[in-house]
Image (cartoon, rainbow, N blue to C red):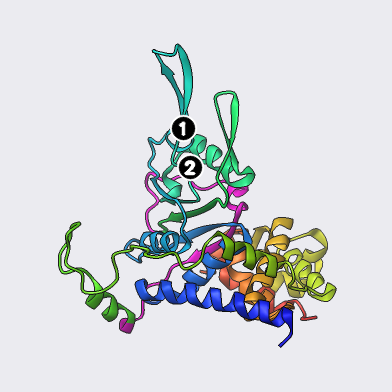
Amino acid sequence: MTENEAEFARSRAVIDAFRAGMAERIVGQEELVKGMLMAWIAGGHVLLEGVPGLAKTLAVKTFSGLAGLDFKRIQFTPDLLPADLVGTLIFEQGKGSFSVRKGPVFANLVLADEINRAPAKVQSALLEAMAERQVTIGEETHRLPEPFFVLATQNPIEQEGTYNLPEAELDRFLLKLQVPYPTPEEEVAIVLAAPIHEGPEAGSRGKADGRGGEASIGPADLRTLREDLGKVRCDGAIVSYIVSLVAATRPSLEARKDRRLRDDYLKYISFGASPRASIALGRLARVNALFEGRDYVLPADVKAVAFPVLRHRLVLSYEAGADGLSADDIIGKILSVVPLP
């Protein structure tokens, strides 16, 4: 085994140990755990979408514990103010001056629960934090801790009292992960592992309490993983394939003249993905290769991450809703149309 292969084997062992630690506390949801870990290694943010009761918050709490991260949860509501998120200036009468009281956004991992319930001003404050890793309080700009990781949840079934996320903010999320219902077998395991009654002193019949325990992956491991990620090679043909996939989401005038493409999927897209999607695909394809213990990217790595990277970056047309098609349906069509390198 070469030195490079040994390094990648160590990285794979770290990844597998972390996923095993999550599996001890979270029943099923392998794709959710994988997506969260991929985004954390890649340095991006994640949008989680699923109905209530699917352990989204539990998964985030467990993730923060195993990663040894400072964790804060913010419940987004229509009356939330930017100061409730980033902090504010407090006048200290004894000193006769203002001091900064930092908000909950100053943490390594921030859970923005039901993010689509917050108004535009709060969305703008979070956008600055996500995009620039800094916030402005008064006239001063403050850097956020490193690493800084936002996991936001939204409920797809309730629309009253919610605000659609701006496209600019959606584009800041590296991934959008959909949290499905568990299988019947997984739900049986969940019921058996649940506490026998509610409350802090609930007798546990399993490990579903969300306590992270000993950190299984720390800052040194993250640096090692990111160093190995930089060694993953992506051939020029793969990069061209990535760009072709993203370009295929953009309904340009030339593309609309192609009857085959127009009839197949272009009529379902109003606006396509930006170059951020190309960057995200390239970055996460490398992470997927790292997960597989390889130092090179295959087209399969790109296809493996295409759905979570692109699903929140497509603005679908009226025809898509009328025909009952989702973003994932359109992405599947694009993957079948764009030729492999």
Horizontally, residue 155 falls left or right of residue 199, namely: right
Mark 1 packing: few (<14 Cα in 10 Å), some, or many (20+)? many
The residue that appears at 62% across and 71% down in the rendered structure is: 305
Which is more toward the observer, 308 or 320? Answer: 308
What amino acid is at disc 2? Val
The residue that appears at 20% across and 69% down in the rendered structure is: 204
Q: Is residue 180 among the parts visible in the rendering?
A: yes
Horizontally, residue 301 falls left or right of residue 146, namely: right
State whether residue 101 is above or below residue 218: above
The residue that appears at 80% across and 80% down in the rendered structure is: 341
Membership of 23 in magenta stretch: no
| Residue 315 x %, y % | 61, 57
| Residue 288 x %, y % | 63, 74
Secondary structure of residue under mark 1:
strand
What amino acid is at disc 1? Gly
Horizontally, residue 88 falls left or right of residue 186, namely: right
Label 2–label 1 contact, CB within 8 A? yes
Image quarter for residue 249?
A: bottom right
Membership of 164 in magenta stretch: yes
Q: Is residue 291 among the parts visible in the rendering?
A: no
The residue where tag 2 is placed is: 105
Residue 87: which disc? 1
Secondary structure of residue under mark 2:
loop
Task: Give the magenta part as a residue range.
Answer: 157-185
| Residue 163 x %, y % | 46, 44
Q: CA distance from mark 2 to mark 1?
A: 8 Å
Mark 2 packing: few (<14 Cα in 10 Å), some, or many (20+)? many
